[in-house]
Amino acid sequence: MKKVILGLLTILALSMSFSCRDTVDKAKSATEEAGAALEEAGEGAIDAAKEASENAMEAAEGAAESVKEAGENTIDAAKKAGDDVKKAANDAAAKKANEIEKAVKN
């Protein structure tokens, strides 16, 4: 009976030993898979950040171009307004000069 009990204990110990090794192998495999998943997720996050950065740069360039265009339009409008004011001043001066000339002749 002692031999049977010792035999069963030996078989139990061996099965536990193999079970522990299997558990260690499975844990090691799971750790490696988790590391690979984290690495892949990190690469995905980096790619997303790069894409967002590129999109922001494109938007900034578009905004800068719009601001430049608006500035050019403002300059053109100011020049036109200046020309209109100059023409109006010249016309008013010419009209006043004609009135003075008529007044002097009469």
Image (spheres, grey):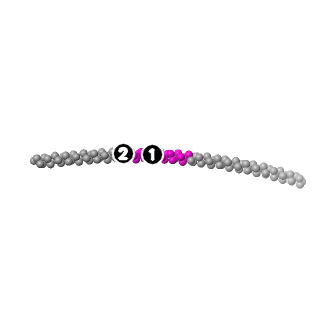
Residue 54 position within the rendered picture, expressed as x and y whole percent measured from the top left: 50, 45
Q: Nearer the viewer, residue 68 or 7?
A: 68
Q: Which label was assigned to residue 61?
A: 1
Q: Which label was assigned to residue 41?
A: none
Residue 85 position within the rendered picture, expressed as x and y whole percent measured from the top left: 26, 47
Which image quadrant: the N terminus?
bottom right
Q: Which residue occupies 35% across, 45% down?
A: 73
Residue 37 position within the rendered picture, expressed as x and y whole percent measured from the top left: 63, 47
Residue type pointed to by label 2: Glu
Q: What element carries label 2?
A: helix
User: How many numbered markers are drawn?
Assistant: 2
Looking at the image, which residue sits at the far bottom?
2
Taking the image as shown, residue 41 lies to the left or right of residue 97, namely: right
Residue type pointed to by label 1: Glu
Looking at the image, which residue sits at the far left?
106
Q: Which residue occupies 54% across, 48% down?
A: 49
Q: What element carries label 1?
A: helix
* Callout 2 crowding tier (Cα within 10 Å): few <14, some 14–19, many ≥20: few
Q: Which residue is denoted by mark 2 in the rendering?
A: 72
Q: Which of 15 and 59 is in front in this view?
A: 59
How far is mark 1 from mark 2, CA to CA? Answer: 16 Å
Q: Earlier in the sequence, mark 1 or mark 2?
A: 1
Give the dominant element type of the magenta stretch: helix, strand or loop.
Answer: helix
Span colored in magenta: 47-68
Taking the image as shown, residue 14 lies to the left or right of residue 40, namely: right
Whether residue 51 appears in magenta in the rendering, the answer is yes
Taking the image as shown, residue 51 lies to the left or right of residue 22, namely: left
Whether residue 38 appears in magenta in the rendering, the answer is no
* Callout 1 crowding tier (Cα within 10 Å): few <14, some 14–19, many ≥20: few
Q: Which residue occupies 78% across, 49% down?
A: 18
Q: Which residue occupies 83% across, 50% down?
A: 11
Q: Nearer the viewer, residue 45 or 1?
A: 45
